[in-house]
Amino acid sequence: MHLAVSLNIASSIGQASLTFAEIAGLVRKAEAAGVDMIIISDSADEPSTSPFEATTLLAGLASVTETIGLVAGASTLAHQPYNLARRFASLDIISHGRIGWNATLRQNPRDAANFSRPEGIADDDFRRRAQEFIGIVQGLWRGWDADALLFDKAGGRFHDPEKMHLLEHKGEFFSVRGPLNIARSPQDTPVLVMSRLAEADRDFAARVADVILLDEQSSESAKSSYDDLKHRAHAAGRKPDAVKVLMTVAAPELAADRLEDWFGSENCDSLNFALPADLSALDDFTDHLLPELQRRALARSAHAGATLRERLGLGVGGAK
């Protein structure tokens, strides 16, 4: 079982925001307990689960952690594809291959109002735009082969031209030449996480995502969603393990027996626990629930693999 934690670290009304030191302490505690990755959402306006811009927070967390995967949300309305691809590629190098981007195909009306679109975008237009955006980002991440940069001072060659790939994208919404001015990621590409999927998003997510987050559902509907996404991935020419399906659950309400039943029914590949940024809630999770899952051999007691892809059992860079 792979374990993720979505930390709700936004301050409530009347409460002070958490400091970076407090957030870092929570993440390090999750890391020490064997959690595979922390997920932090972001928005240009409330609601958000972070008092900081999420990718900036990830840069700080990368410097004070060693093994845990760090995943941040970033809006396709609030960024341009080139800058977002460059930011996450930089974070992945800084963290030695522990970064993921949580993308969504649903628009936040408050985001739209803050970025010169007070009326928002029609849902179909937003979906097409977001899909094009995600495709560009993934293409830019693959713009350099792993061994493209030679740094051959004596021979006067910075890179091998045959191993540099211009994107030359001209689409409905964007025009991007590429490549990035950043080398290939230590884990080939950052992990692409997709969440808040509508029915119309499932084919696309099954075709391109590394990880799909699903909201908590009944055991029966979870099984149906899991099988459906795996079937769509297979239809897209991917192997079943090329995409991991995580079910989001509210950890304080869970018991180990229920979780064991879920895995016995093959309702998901992994679990994403939604936790408030409260030390007592995290203590309950790391000191009681997680050890019981480890005792039942449903969760690892330590990380396996140096990169987030390795820990999640994913192939490199969207490999099929």
Image (cartoon, helix red, strand yellow):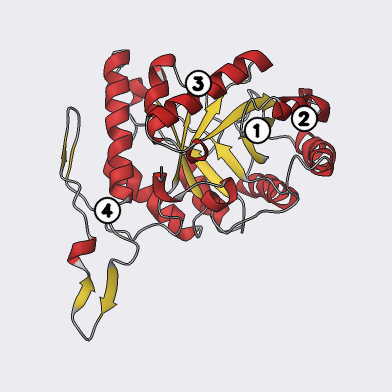
Can you tell which of label 4 and label 3 is closer to the viewer? 3
Residue 17 in view of the camera: no
Badge 2, how many Cα within 10 Å: few under 14, some, many 20+? some
Amino acid, disc 3: Asp
Q: Which residue is mark 2?
A: 260
Residue 104, image x and y in percent?
Answer: 43, 27
Q: Which residue is mark 3?
A: 228
Residue 50, which numbered label? none
Amino acid, disc 1: Leu
Badge 4, how many Cα within 10 Å: few under 14, some, many 20+? many
Q: Do tag 1 and tag 2 residues touch (Cβ < 8 Å)?
A: no
Q: Say which element carries label 4.
A: loop
Give the mark nearest the N terminus, 4 or 3: 4
At horizontal 39% and vertical 28% (from top left) the residue drawn is 235
**Looking at the picture, does residue 158 appear above or below residue 97?**
below
Gap in Å between the C-alphas at discs 2 and 3? 22 Å
At horizontal 21% and vertical 50% (from top left) the residue drawn is 178
Q: Which residue is mark 1?
A: 271
Give the mark nearest the N terminus, 1 or 4: 4
Gap in Å between the C-alphas at discs 1 and 4? 32 Å
Nearest the viewer among 243 and 279 is 243
At horizontal 60% and vertical 42% (from top left) the residue drawn is 38
Q: Say which element carries label 1.
A: strand
Gap in Å between the C-alphas at discs 1 and 3? 18 Å
